[in-house]
Amino acid sequence: MKTILKSVLLLFLLAFSLQSCEDQDDVESPAGLQVNDFVWKGLNQFYLWQADVPNLADDRFNNQEALNSFLRGYSKPEDLFQDLLNKPISKFPKGQAIDRFSWIVPDYSVLEQELQGTTKNSGVDFRLSYKPGSTTNLVGYVRYIIPNSDASTKEIKRGDLFTAVNGTQLTVSNYQGLLAADSFTLNMASYNGTDFVSNGKTVSLVKTTLNENPVFINKVIPLGSSKIGYLMYNGFYANYDTQLNAAFAELKSQGITDLILDLRYNGGGSIQTATRLASMITGQFTSKIFAKEKWNAKINEFYESEDPESLNNRFVDKIDGAAINSLNLSKIYIITTSGTASASELVINGLAPYISVIQVGETTVGKNVGSITLYDSPTFGKAKRNPNHKYAMQPLVLKIVNAADFGEYTDGLKPTVEQLEHFSNLGVLGDPSEPLLSVAISQITGSTAKKVQLDKGIALKNFTDSKAMTGIRDQMYIEKAPEGLLRALK
């Protein structure tokens, strides 16, 4: 209902705020500028930092022709999009941009699938790090293999190392091109104590269309008087919320006393799903505020005057009419790494004012902002999309804070108990002896976990991972209303 109401309000807002644009539209945007026109107008309306980008100012162009003249300076919509994002500022090293997460795609059907966990994928989930002593060369290690993928039929497993693709060393400048191919061969490597060297093995992989169920492991670990639930959850994909609810039903039926939620490789996803997950963990806070949204001044002002409740995300007790299987916990243990982002961080931050959150592992990415999918249509929704192209944008449009108004964690959320995940001792996911899980269990049982020490001189610096490169791309996004509703409102 909140999603539907929000879309209704946005449509009224657009009808009002775009009136000024209509005054400029005596001169229509030429066919060759349609995508660029969509990019500018969509960002002008929704972009979180619209007021901070001079070329997105409401009074930047006197009329449509003046805007067209500006748009003609960009032959590629992607270049225009990048130039309109919030610029680097001096306090960030190496000109790092404030906005690290907005993106644009030439085919919205691919984007829609990615946000629901469907990707063209070899099935290898990996992390890339800098090789020791290098600022350009990379080494990768396998974090897990996606079931029913091409990789699941090959001789490759968690912990395997690779340094090259098709015989070419992976670097910061070529990794995207090498790993984007529909088929490629990984050149595997071994660690000799000081460096990563080729071991002569290769693994040829082919990408197929994969639907990844984010509920990767769901089990109960009985230890003494404790029955510890362990859920490894790898993506906030709304179309798997029923499966997530079923996983909690299973944990509930087994009478677990504690829950370890493993979000170490979860790059984020749906805000609605994050709210539902938090409601499954608890259950005693139904209708209380889980998180608050803060949009740009234009949209925020409209919401605050017309319906401030639309800015709130509240704990729920149902999913599409079906009861949520809540555990009513007052404490939770959450495993994180530097690959934990956006909606995962929202769950941690949103729960913090209500229950005790024990975070185990590494500092998270630090993404406290969310996006929305914009299409080239009169309302920027799916209805009446421009048939001449399939471009869509996923720009950042809101900042999110918890019920206590805290949301300043751009440097990441620091763990309560630190334990680095190390490539040389990854362990088996779900096994109580796996390093991060072992530390989390020790927090419950009071036992002493063996801290994993890094090999001398080989603390790898993280570069990126497979989820940040494709799919949800460390995103946190809001859902769109049903197409039928948008058509009815027009």
Image (cartoon, rainbow, N blue to C red):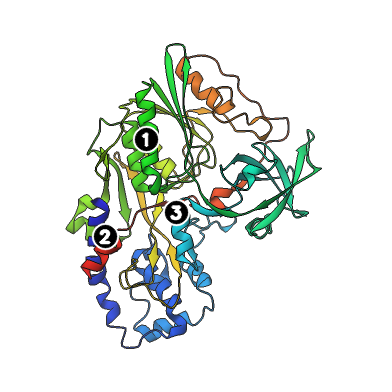
Report the Cα–Cα distance between label 3 and label 1. 21 Å
Mark toward the start of the polypeptide (1 vs 2):
2
Residue 341, how many percent across, how many down?
47, 44
- Helix, strand or loop under label 1: helix
- Helix, strand or loop under label 2: helix
Residue 2, how many percent across, how many down?
24, 51
Q: In this view of the protein, can residue 471 be seen by the observer?
A: no
Type of the residue with mark 2? Ser
* Nearer the camera: disc 3 or disc 2: 3
At 38% across and 21% down in the image, what residue appears?
A: 256
Report the Cα–Cα distance between label 1 and label 2. 29 Å
Label 3 neighbourhood size at 10 Å, few (<14), some (14-19), many (20+)?
Answer: many
Foreground of the two, 474 or 241 = 241
- Left or right, 188 with respect to 149, comes to right
Mark toward the start of the polypeptide (3 vs 1):
3
Label 2 neighbourhood size at 10 Å, few (<14), some (14-19), many (20+)?
Answer: many
Mark toward the start of the polypeptide (3 vs 2):
2
Which mark is drawn over residue 7? 2
Report the Cα–Cα distance between label 3 and label 2. 19 Å
Which mark is drawn over residue 115? 3
Q: Quadrant of the C terminus?
A: bottom left
* Nearer the camera: disc 1 or disc 2: 1
At 34% across and 82% down in the image, what residue appears?
A: 62
At 37% across and 76% down in the image, what residue appears?
A: 60
- Helix, strand or loop under label 3: loop
Type of the residue with mark 3? Leu
| Vertical relation: 200 (above or below) 72 | above
Which mark is drawn over residue 246? 1
